[in-house]
């Protein structure tokens, strides 16, 4: 005989609430946390970047104000306020902010790849003397004797587990070389563009 306290399907309505209410609250909490993290990610970015992100002015102002607060407790309260403001955004606004952050990560990824390439070149310098010969031939302005000393010291640092002072200096030299190449390429591209413009003007 069916229990009169149960519905026609044999379950109390409170059992349905107990079963489905908890996941709903969990989902809401995840959404709140995601928006809070999105706000924190914006706070961590340079101000000029934040100013270019499409979002309501009051949300942007809350983020920019948080960036200026140095007091720990004051910053914590402002961060919570930013999270509250983020929850006023609609799906399209959140998607636009996420897209902007993803594009910045793409730039960071490119920077990371460039750094890894420099690290690999440094490792080759330490293991293959021919790499140094090639580097000096491509960049005659480099101090060959200084580089050889750094490489020798870096090998010694690794062998004796010493602080990587020379190892880091080699990386900085390689970084400067790469920056010079990038600047030269940009200058060549600009010169080529100017030459093309001059040709078009002559026509």
Image: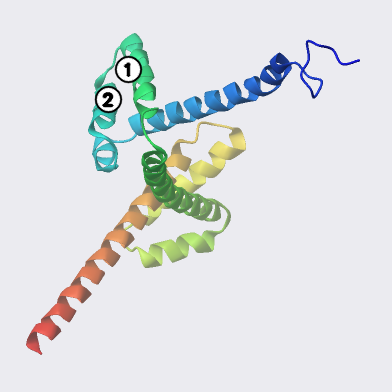
Near-viewer residue (157 or 124) = 124
Q: Are marks 2 and 1 in contact (CB under 8 Å)?
A: yes
Q: Secondary structure at mark 2?
A: helix
Q: How is the image coloured?
A: rainbow
In the image, residue 165 lies at what x, y percent?
Answer: 45, 36
Q: Residues within 10 Å of mark 1 (few under 14, many from 20)?
A: some
Q: Callout 2: 10 Å neighbours few (<14), some, many (20+)?
A: some
Above or below, 195 against 105 in this view is below
Q: Residue at x 32, y 62 (%)?
A: 181
Residue farthest along the bottom direction in this orientation: 203
Determine which of the numbered discs, if any, sits on residue 162 in the image. Answer: none
Instruction: Evaluate whether residue 182 shows in this view.
Output: yes
Residue 105 location, quadrant: top left
The answer to which image quadrant residue 135 occupies is: bottom left
Q: Position of residue 144 (x, y in %)?
A: 38, 56
Position in image of residue 14 (x %, y %): 70, 14
Quarter holding the C terminus is bottom left
Disc 1 on helix, strand or loop?
helix
Residue that label 1 marks:
78
Residue 15 vs residue 60, the one in the foreground = 15
Instruction: Determine whether, in the image, residue 151 is placed left or right of residue 47.
Output: right
Tell me which label, 2 or 1, sits earlier in the chain: 2
Q: Residue at x 40, y 46 (%)?
A: 99
């Amino acid at each position: 005989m069916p229990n009169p306290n149960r519905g026609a399907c044999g379950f109390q309505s409170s059992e349905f609430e107990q079963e489905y209410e908890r996941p709903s609250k969990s989902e809401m909490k995840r959404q709140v946390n995601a928006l809070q993290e999105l706000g924190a990610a914006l706070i961590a970015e340079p101000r000029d970047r934040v100013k270019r992100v499409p979002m309501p002015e009051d949300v942007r102002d809350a983020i920019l104000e948080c960036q200026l607060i140095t007091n720990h407790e004051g910053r914590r309260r402002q961060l919570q306020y930013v999270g509250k403001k983020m929850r006023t955004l609609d799906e399209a606004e959140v998607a636009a902010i996420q897209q902007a952050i993803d594009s910045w990560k793409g730039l960071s990824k490119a920077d990371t790849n460039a750094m890894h390439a420099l690290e690999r070149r440094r490792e080759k310098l330490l293991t293959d003397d021919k790499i140094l010969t090639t580097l000096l031939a491509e960049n005659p302005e480099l101090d060959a004797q200084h580089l050889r000393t750094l490489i020798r010291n870096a090998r010694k640092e690794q062998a004796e587990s010493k602080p990587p002072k020379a190892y880091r200096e080699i990386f900085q030299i390689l970084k400067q070389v790469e920056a010079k190449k990038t600047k030269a390429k940009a200058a060549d591209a600009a010169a080529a563009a100017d030459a093309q413009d001059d040709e078009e003007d002559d026509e």
